[in-house]
Image (cartoon, rainbow, N blue to C red):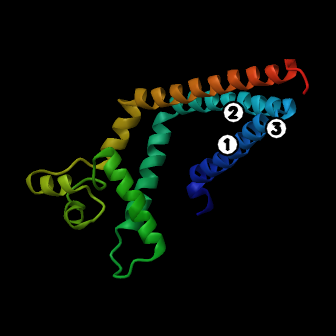
Amino acid sequence: MLFRFVGVYILIAVGAVMMFVGFLGCYGAIQESQCLLGTFFACLVILFACEVAAGIWGFLNKDQISKEVITFYDFVYDKGTSFTGIQNDQQQAAAAVLKVFHETLNCCGKGGLLNFAEKLFTDTCPGELKINAVVSLPPSCHTKIKELFSEKIYLIGIAALVVAVIMIFEMIFSMVLCCGIRNSPVY
């Protein structure tokens, strides 16, 4: 069970590191500290290299990532749509994640006729998909996830490129500020 959410733990760790790096940059700029700004720059270079490596690895293993996302979706779907009568905190959290999946990908359910009735009575499916479900089966999220990682990989690439450009500007500005502090007269 511990290894089921390795991706979530990695994202939490990356968020904590980014918060620390942001603190270094802000505090270094406020205090006009070359040491903190230099550390901020070094951390940004390391994070940029990790981002490039993760992007290359992700592109080469996009099929495996797609399978992992589908497995995660299935787990959340089973947890969020179980009809026990009383909703606990885990079930509400799973339903919220499920709703984000459905609204983002404009899909509902795992697919197939077995989940057709659940789609009509589930609160997590978008409203227009429920209305259309009477006429035809709404697209399954398995299909949409596979499509995202195979046909629309360029969207993920564009998002990564935007983040990379922002990081490059951050590195440039931090070095300019660090050099400006070094060259300024002491007051």
Marks 2 and 1, Cα distance to the nearest angstrom?
9 Å
Q: Is residue 167 above or below residue 116?
A: above
Specify few, some or many for label 2: CA neighbours under 10 Å numbering under 14, 14-19, or 20 or more: some
Q: Residue at x 68, y 27 (%)?
A: 49
Marks 3 and 1, Cα distance to the nearest angstrom?
20 Å
Q: Which residue is labeled 1 in the image?
A: 18
Q: Is residue 137 left or right of residue 69?
A: left
Q: Residue at x 36, y 39 (%)?
A: 146
Mark 2 or mark 1, whichever is nearer to me: 1
Determine the image quadrant of residue 91.
Answer: bottom left
Q: Residue at x 32, y 42 (%)?
A: 144
Task: Tell whether label 1 touches label 2 (CB within 8 Å).
Answer: yes
Determine the image quadrant of residue 120.
Answer: bottom left
Q: Amino acid at mark 3?
A: Gln
Q: Amino acid at mark 1?
A: Met
Q: Which residue is labeled 2 in the image?
A: 47
- Ranked by sequence position, the earlier of labels 2 and 1 is 1
Q: Amino acid at mark 2?
A: Leu
Task: Give the x, y percent position of residue 69.
Answer: 45, 47
The disc placed on residue 31 is 3
